[in-house]
Amino acid sequence: MTELSKLQGFMAELLRRRGALPKDAELSRLVAQHVSGNDRLSPIEQLEIYREQFWLRHTSALVEDFPGLGGILGQEDWQRLVEGYLLERAPTSFSLRDLGEGLPAFVERSTWLPERRLCTDMARLEWAYVEVFDAPDAGKLEPDRLAALPLDAWETARCVLSPALRLLPVRYPVADLRRALKRSTENGEAVPLPAEMPQNLVIYRGTNLRIFDKEVGDAAFGLLHALAEGEPLLTACERAAAVAAARSETIESELQGWFASFGELGFIVDVRVEDRTDPL
Amino acid sequence: MTEAPRLGAPDWGVGVGLRVPHYRHILSRQPDVDFFEIIGENFMVAGGKPLYHLERVLERYRVILHGVSLSIGGPEPPDRDYLRRLKALVRRVRPPWVSDHFCWCGAGGAHLHDLLPLPYTTEAVRRVAERARMVQDFLEVRFALENTSSYLAYTSSSMTEWEFISEVAERADIGLMFDVNNVYVAAYNHGFDPYAYVRGIPHRRVVQVHLAGHTNLGKYIIDTHRGHVIDPVWDLYRETIELCGPVSTLIEWDDEIPDFPVLMAEAERARATRDGALGQAPAHVAVPLPERADASNDGAATGAERMWAQGGPRELPEDAAPFETP
């Protein structure tokens, strides 16, 4: 390793430290070997400017991407959470957009958190928004593509779901809570935390590039899951029917309605039919 | 050695940074702007609103690419995936040059998202020049590096900052993105003559100039890109244009971003200053160091006021629309 690389490694470690750099003699001596200082700022004070920026910049980026989580926790717990996260997981991506990728899992592991299950749901929701926001663009399924599919093709045909779609089962109504928290920043009204109420959320980017969350029933959610896993259409429908069996005798018309809706909302962007032509 | 001014890069006049709060104004009013500069990293995404907005701007305006994350002087060489994504963006935008910074951004795999200064040593010259040449070859477009604002200096530096950037630019045969405000900030923070800097660089290599406001905390100045360009920086800019000739100039305003007409008024001031400088012979007069602000105001600023950011706010999902149920 070159002298320059050693210096940079030394500095990078100091810049990621939480809390102001101590002005003790040992660190002062070490830093002064590399950083000049001047008549206004000591070498440590010069380095401290950059260390402070590291924390301001990264905590601000997380606040921007996880306002709902911050709203649940309040300032003190939020600060403790993101500091722990940044200490455990150094940013590695060139883009601040990726900074929160590991936050949902970190929240889930943070056993000290009040309302941890609610917080985990919120973090997963907010990360889904980030992912969906700039996911690849995709076209929209032609309305008659599915209807025109021969019956035997359903055994092998597979739907392609939009890359700007996430399937998110949650235990709390976090999308509604997030909207309420956002309103509360404008009107100042306190927002009560909700009781458990499991939901199947589809987070997706509409064809107008706006982001939506849609709650769907268990069977429709099962169908989407099966399609997302690459199951053939027939198998996916059978899985949905199995979920719906206990309560529905009209699964066929429900399936038709779901497929029409999924196509219209842009959930399904293509149908791929396996070519069974004998190559010989 | 290339003798053409600006290494043959075109003079695009006076532009402004493309920032999220102005999208609506720009796309609906279509104001006359010579060119926009985008922060490349904000558009190195797969799809959605950022690329939609970029395409709409490209339909009407010239756009230049400026990066903040290359980390050309870091311990590890520039990230290949980053370069591939940057090249894809270059192909989309087709700018006459692409720029980043004389800096490093992290070590040991950590990306600190800052423009950390390099020591001005022969080892750093070698490292940065070799990589800059490689980046320019890979991108297949003129590459330029920008002098940064800095808040610390190294004991190991063996040359001035302007000697350092000149040596790298000559060795790598790249352009200079010359940030006049950064010269002023660094001169203030490190106590050198900013005019010696402006006069000491290879002027024919300057392909673009940046101008911006900053925040003076007394003991040091931070390059916040907040507020108007101050008069001593306008004076330095005039000197720069007198020495370099007509160079594309850009106003950066990334914090407390004003309404678009305010930004354009700043660009018009740059245009007037530029036009004035181009009608004058260079005036090589001794200029005193900038006055220090009252050091007693240090510590009065809040953390947010001290924070600096490149490129203004990111476009966030929330900017696209409040989250909705269909």
Image (tube, coloured by chain):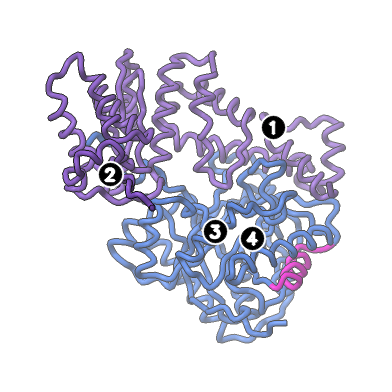
Chain colours: A purple, B blue
Region of the chain picked out in magenta, as a range: B159-173
Q: Earlier in the sequence, mark 4 or mark 3?
A: 3
Residue on which disc 2 sits = A206
The local secondary structure at tag 2 comes to loop
Are the two marked residues, 4 and 1, in contact with CB atoms closer than 8 angstroms? no
Marks 4 and 1: which is nearer the front?
1
Residue on which disc 4 sits = B182
User: Horizontal placement of A99 versus A243: left or right?
Assistant: right
Alpha carbon of mark 2 to alpha carbon of mark 4: how far? 42 Å
Are the two marked residues, 4 and 3, in contact with CB atoms closer than 8 angstroms? no
Alpha carbon of mark 2 to alpha carbon of mark 3: how far? 27 Å
Taking the image as drawn, is residue B212 in sight?
A: yes
Q: Quadrant of the C terminus of chain B?
A: top left
Chain letter of disc 1? A
User: Horizontal placement of B81 versus B74: left or right?
Assistant: left
Tell me which amino acid carries mark 3: Leu
Q: Looking at the picture, does residue A185 appear above or below residue A141?
A: above
Chain letter of disc 3? B
Q: Return the mark for residue A17.
A: 1
Q: Quadrant of the N terminus of chain B?
A: bottom right
Marks 3 and 1: which is nearer the front?
3
Marks 1 and 2: which is nearer the front?
2
From the image, give the main secondary structure of the stretch colored magenta.
helix
Alpha carbon of mark 4 to alpha carbon of mark 1: how far? 27 Å
Residue on which disc 3 sits = B86
Tell me which amino acid carries mark 2: Gly
Seen at 74% across and 40% down, the residue is A45
